[in-house]
Image (spheres, rainbow, N blue to C red):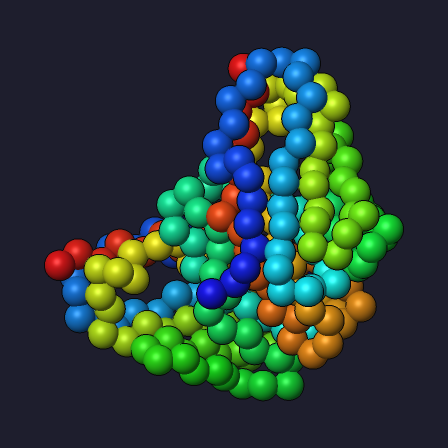
Amino acid sequence: KQEVTQIPAALSVPEGENLVLNCSFTDSAIYNLQWFRQDPGKGLTSLLLIQSSQREQTSGRLNASLDKSSGRSTLYIAASQPGDSATYLCAVKRNQAGTALIFGKGTTLSVSS
Amino acid sequence: EADIYQTPRYLVIGTGKKITLECSQTMGHDKMYWYQQDPGMELHLIHYSYGVNSTEKGDLSSESTVSRIRTEHFPLTLESARPSHTSQYLCASSVGGEGEKLFFGSGTQLSVL
């Protein structure tokens, strides 16, 4: 059974710091991996999607990497800002035909000014 | 910006009431999903649909039911709400093909007294 773990559960940093959020999954046979952002009381916004054949994806100050063989992904946030404060969720898709994403519990990030 | 809408945003009702949570998307996506999320916990898939007149149960057992009569509309119904149904319900949609990036609505926070 695929399980997704995110460490740390919570993180507080001062504005301007670079930071890394970690995601690990138990079954390396995945189709893709997505990173989402969730603001309090709201839905999820997809940030980056990495196909199983890819090693990384970049969008602005965000960079996500994928090491399928070791069952790990990282989300790197450069020059953090207070507006980055949110919960970041990692989710894996088992296969192309499979429908469900398996989510981690998320890392809650707080960036202070 | 994704065009997927959920109503109501918040709902507080008494035990035994019948409720319907609405979800609509204007992107023409064939695939739609309902996820359930408790505070600090993972999202779990409770229902999904691959198109009109297609509905399936997800990984997490739920007493709710869904229907898909129109592509853009995917309502979720609870015939008799109970306190155990208190949770956040998130609707999502995606287009088929490689990637299948998910777009989420803002969610409905349901409280059953």
From what the image shows, is residue B75 above or below residue A37?
above
Asked whether residue A62 appears in the rendered view, the answer is yes
Query: Toward the viewer: B48 or A71?
Result: B48
List x then y, in percent, for residue B53. 86, 51
- Looking at the image, residue A47 sits to the left or right of residue B102; the answer is left
Query: Toward the viewer: B85 or A19?
Result: B85
From what the image shows, is residue A4 above or below residue A62?
above
Query: Toward the viewer: B27 or A60?
Result: B27
**Quarter of the image that includes the C terminus of chain B:** top right
* Residue at 69% from the left image edge and 21% from the top image edge: B18
Asked whether residue A30 appears in the rendered view, the answer is no
Query: Toward the viewer: A3 or B39?
Result: B39
- Looking at the image, residue A41 sits to the left or right of residue B101; the answer is left
* Residue at 66% from the left image edge and 47% from the top image edge: B34
* Residue at 74% from the left image edge and 63% from the top image edge: B30
List x then y, in percent, for residue A102. 63, 57
From what the image shows, is residue B96 above or below residue A108?
below
* Residue at 68% from the left image edge and 65% from the top image edge: B28
- Looking at the image, residue A108 sits to the left or right of residue A3; the answer is left
